Image: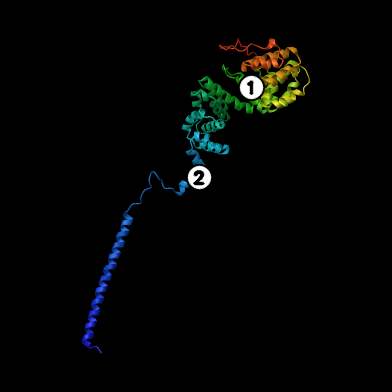
Amino acid sequence: MIQKPQQLVILICTLLVGAAAGHWMGKSDNDTAKTATASTSIAIATPVPKPSVSQPAVTEEKKDEDSNPRVAAEKKSLEEIMKERNAGTRTRLLEEFAHNIAPQNIAAALKDLKKMNGSARDLAQKLLVSRWIETDPNGALAFAGQNRDFASIASDVMQQEAAEDFQGALDRARSIQDPTARYQALRGVLSYLTDTDPLKALTLAQTMETFPGEEPLIQTVYRQWATVDPLAAAQAAQNSGETGWRSPVNQVLRNWASSDPLAAINWSSQLNDPNLQARDIAQIVRQWSRDDPSAAAGWLNSQPAGPTRDAAAMALAFSLGGSDPSAALNWAQSIADPATRDNALERLARQIMYTNPSNGAAMLQAAGVPQNLIPPPPNPNGGNGGGWRGGRRGGP
């Protein structure tokens, strides 16, 4: 058994060791806490690094913008859009581009567009002009007056203004100083009126000034009217009493022939004057053959001999002269009246010699064209041999 004095010594030693251990452990805990506190302070005080300029941070908002076709259209240049091969994608991008472009940038875009090629150029211009008229019609009109290549924009602007205030638009159109822009502006006013009251538009057009080198304004009314109601337009044109290639009747019939040639021919066939009847049907066939030569030739093959068929065969021959000279010569030779046939062959011979001077004569001789109807080759030193191309300009 351990004596009591020894037990007392052991107890004292145990207490001293425990106190030392507790002091050391407490200091260790305090140091750890201080270290943790210091680390926390450093973490809070250190700023978050900013995204690098060369490598921007990608956010969810950025991803949404990239997937938005409207934002994508803004980022693509007009030139890039015009090079897009997929027609549907190109049209969508053009629509978005026109919708988002600032009005003050449209003029530059139109000028850039004029330098580009492609089937979508007309669509792009229409979209841009439409947007300009919607957002800044005064700016569009001023641009048209200052840039003759874009004078037709004045027509679109004034057509829109006429729908809102007809008399105000008419007065404004007449006040435009530049004659080209004024002509286009008046066309726009008349275009609106033709859609609503074509007879009133005709009456108004007759009171307007003439513009040298431009189509008469009354002709624009007839042409537009013919696209809506060709029968009424033809009857009104017939009552005008004007004749000739540029007469209102011919203007209407040419437009009618593009939409319904047989209906136009039926109307012309009811004319009492055989000469007018033959002339009008020839105009219809000529326009028809430009749109659908096979259909025009098929109809002509079913027609009986006579002045009307001869006039139509001449018109078809002249229409085919540039693209299919052999077929054109065959149609000319099918004309029954000798004087009409020689007239047609002579004019075709001049056209063929002009376009094919090296072997045109041989082609004409092989087709059986009389030698006296074959002109000499064009002058190699320049000139046109005294107008040897021949024929009435624009005639059947």
Residue farthest bottom in this picture = 1
- Decide if residue 202 is in sight here: yes
- In the foreground, 74 or 173: 74
**Which label sits on residue 352?**
none
Callout 2: 10 Å neighbours few (<14), some, many (20+)?
A: few
Callout 1 secondary element: helix
Three-letter code for the amino acid on which mark 2 is drawn: Ser
Say which quadrant the C terminus sits in: top right
Q: Residue 127 location, x and y as percent?
A: 54, 33
Three-letter code for the amino acid on which mark 1 is drawn: Leu
- Decide if residue 244 is in sight here: no
Describe residue 308's horizontal placement relative to residue 384 as left or right.
Answer: right
Compute the Cα span from label 2 to label 1: 52 Å
Say which quadrant the N terminus sits in: bottom left
Quarter holding residue 358: top right
Q: Does residue 74 lie above or below 44 as drawn?
A: above
Callout 2 secondary element: helix
Q: Residue 206 location, x and y as percent?
A: 62, 19
Q: Nearer the viewer, mark 2 or mark 1?
A: 2
Q: Residue 351 location, x and y as percent?
A: 64, 16
Callout 1: 10 Å neighbours few (<14), some, many (20+)?
A: many
**Which label sits on residue 202?**
1
Circle 2 residue: 67
| N-term-proximal mark, 2 vs 1 | 2
Q: Does residue 18 lie above or below 64 as drawn?
A: below
